[in-house]
Amino acid sequence: MTLNVEKYLELYSETQGLMPEKLQEYGEKYREQGHLTQDQLYEIAYESSTRSAYHVRKNPEKICREVTTNILGAEGDFSKIALASSLKGFKAPTASCILTALNPEKHAVVDTRVWASLERFGGLERRKESFGPFDYIEMIKPIREIAEEQGYSAAEIGYALFAHDYDKREGTLH
């Protein structure tokens, strides 16, 4: 089975997923400033998960800047997602927004919908409802493979996989 990326990127705008344009703006600010502020992190978290965004306010401003600065210099995907996940309010799915904002060619926003689509396509073997850094590493590999095969960014594949689940899922998300 092949993912029809173009079709699902079009459908993505009908979902309630994070808007790619917003994330792109945060990425531009991030690269320009060399860090993200607590307010910017709150906004990203709110876009991704309104219910848990309030936790971001528990992170001191200095720590927000320190962690996001360190992500820029970190080697390896695990180190980057682990750093981002160390912030309050940033479990791996929300943390993936930070990495995707920073480098959409290499990273994707992930969640239960993306996992479910990857499972349908045979890229993952079991149902999953919550994610940590190791799960992000497991998900990003097939996402990058699809991106390379089809000529899209990892971020675009993530959005298409989200929309694919939105389209195909029967019943409720949880």
Image: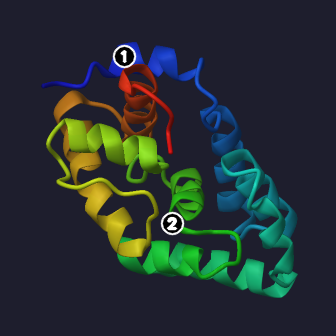
Residue drawn at point x = 45 percent, y = 28 percent: 171
The percent coordinates of residue 80 (x first, y second) are 47, 74
Q: Nearer the viewer, mark 2 or mark 1?
A: 2
Q: How many neighbours does mark 2 have within 10 angstroms: few (below 14), some (14-19), or many (20 or more)?
A: many
Q: CA distance from mark 2 to mark 1?
A: 26 Å
The percent coordinates of residue 167 (x first, y second) are 42, 20
The percent coordinates of residue 107 (x first, y second) are 42, 53
Residue drawn at point x = 17 percent, y = 24 percent: 2
Quarter occupied by residue 33: bottom right
Dot 1 lies on which element? Answer: helix
Left or right of residue 49: residue 13: left
Specify the quadrant that holds the N terminus: top left
Q: Find disc 1 in the rendering and name its residue.
A: 6
Quarter occupied by residue 31: bottom right
Among numbered discs 2 and 1, the one appearing first in the sequence: 1
Q: Nearer the viewer, residue 69 or 50?
A: 50
Q: Find disc 2 in the rendering and name its residue.
A: 92
Quarter occupied by residue 37: bottom right
Q: Nearer the viewer, residue 75 or 135?
A: 135
Which disc is residue 24 wearing?
A: none
Q: Nearer the viewer, residue 16 or 19?
A: 16
Left or right of residue 101: residue 39: right
Circle 2/circle 1 CB separation < 8 Å: no
59 shown above or below 6: below
Dot 2 lies on which element? Answer: helix
42 shown above or below 63: above
Q: Amino acid at mark 1?
A: Glu
Left or right of residue 54: residue 170: left
Residue drawn at point x = 41 percent, y = 73 percent: 133
Q: Nearer the viewer, residue 11 or 107?
A: 11
Q: Amino acid at mark 2?
A: Ala
Residue drawn at point x = 46 percent, y = 63 percent: 130
